[in-house]
Image (spheres, rainbow, N blue to C red):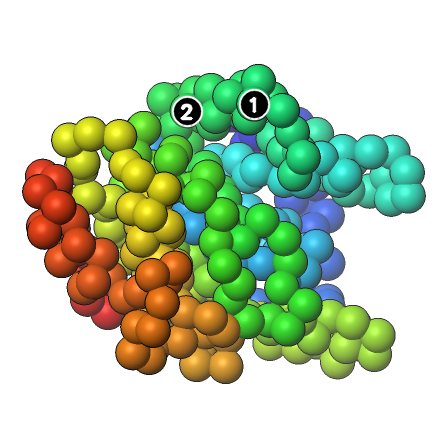
């Protein structure tokens, strides 16, 4: 599974590169944080259907394979996305899938990582209509815990302007690569609460490379509920409950 080796992928990049220059002013920051090789889970925010195209383009020359909603793999109403999904070897995910379907997606994702590629995930599970970060789903946490590979936050901002007349003003779109980090290594299966806490741990790395207006529910503020908290609270809670871990959180 190596999309960049496919002729169709090379043709698509030759078409998309000038198209991106035509419709947006793309700025890529922090790409030195992206290792040249080795398995990675890319944690990305999501505001527009073209986010994945821009993320994949920004990650080049490395191979990256993204999880995408199954609706994009349908011929109708927009065959363009079906073509792009096939070219990039994207993996369909059903929002209402059965347990067996979820297990199959996890196995496929682990295989992508075993082959040394970048696995792209949108933890929020859907586009944000406001542009602000939304509550993350647990899938990214479970994959990271099972694989043990590092994660890299890759934020995007500006694509929310690609609506209506926004297509004609060439908005500035900024893709920022954060620093690698790892999830704590737990000595037993995490509880539902811990999975939620680790989701916060992940999303705060993404938040830290986004402008404040995109922080949404992960805005820095005192913890008032058990549902979300900050990274320091995650670490403290794991220490109190006696889990062993090695947290390589990077302070940005």
Asked if residue 6 lies left or right of residue 113, the reply is right
At a point 9% along the width and 51% down the height, the residue shown is 240
**Residue denoted by label 1:** 99
Residue 74 versus residue 221 in the image, above or below: above
- Judging depth in this view, the residue of 243 and 29 nearest the camera is 243
Residue 3 versus residue 23 in the image, above or below: above
Marks counted in the figure total 2
The Cα–Cα distance between marks 1 and 2, rounded to whole angstroms, is 16 Å
Which label belongs to residue 8? none
Is mark 1 in CB contact (under 8 Å) with mark 2? no
Quadrant holding the C terminus: bottom left
Asked if residue 60 lies left or right of residue 198, the reply is right
Q: Work out whether residue 104 can be spotted.
A: yes
Asked if residue 156 lies left or right of residue 12, the reply is left
- Judging depth in this view, the residue of 190 and 205 nearest the camera is 190
| Residue 210 percent coordinates (x, y) | 43, 72
At a point 13% along the width and 46% down the height, the residue shown is 241
> Quadrant of residue 74 in the image?
top right
Residue 118 versus residue 128 in the image, above or below: above
> Which element carries disc 2, helix, strand or loop?
helix
- Judging depth in this view, the residue of 4 and 166 nearest the camera is 166
| Residue 151 percent coordinates (x, y) | 32, 46
How many residues crowd around disc 2 within 10 Å: few (fewer than 14), some, or many (20 or more)? some
């Amino acid at each position: 599974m190596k999309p960049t080796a496919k002729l169709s992928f090379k043709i698509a990049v030759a078409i998309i590169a000038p198209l991106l220059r035509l419709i947006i002013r793309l700025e890529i920051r922090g790409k030195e944080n992206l290792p040249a090789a080795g398995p990675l889970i890319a944690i990305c925010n999501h505001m527009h259907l073209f986010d994945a195209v821009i993320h994949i383009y920004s990650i080049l020359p490395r191979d990256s394979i993204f999880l995408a909603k199954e609706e994009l793999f349908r011929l109708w109403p927009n065959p363009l996305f079906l073509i792009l999904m096939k070219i990039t070897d994207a993996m369909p995910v059903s929002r209402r899938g059965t347990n067996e379907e979820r297990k199959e997606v996890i196995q496929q994702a682990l295989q992508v990582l075993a082959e040394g590629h970048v696995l792209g995930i949108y933890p929020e599970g859907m586009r944000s209509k406001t542009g602000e970060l939304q509550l993350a789903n647990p899938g990214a946490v479970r994959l990271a815990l099972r694989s043990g590979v590092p994660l890299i936050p890759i934020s995007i901002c500006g694509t929310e302007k690609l609506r209506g007349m926004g297509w004609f003003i060439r908005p500035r779109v900024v893709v920022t690569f954060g620093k690698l980090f790892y999830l704590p290594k737990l000595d037993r299966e995490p509880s539902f609460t811990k999975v939620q806490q680790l989701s916060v741990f992940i999303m705060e790395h993404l938040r830290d490379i986004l402008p404040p207006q995109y922080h949404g529910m992960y805005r820095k503020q005192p913890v008032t509920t058990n549902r979300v908290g900050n990274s320091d609270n995650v670490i403290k809670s794991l220490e109190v409950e006696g889990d062993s871990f090695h947290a390589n959180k990077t302070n940005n």
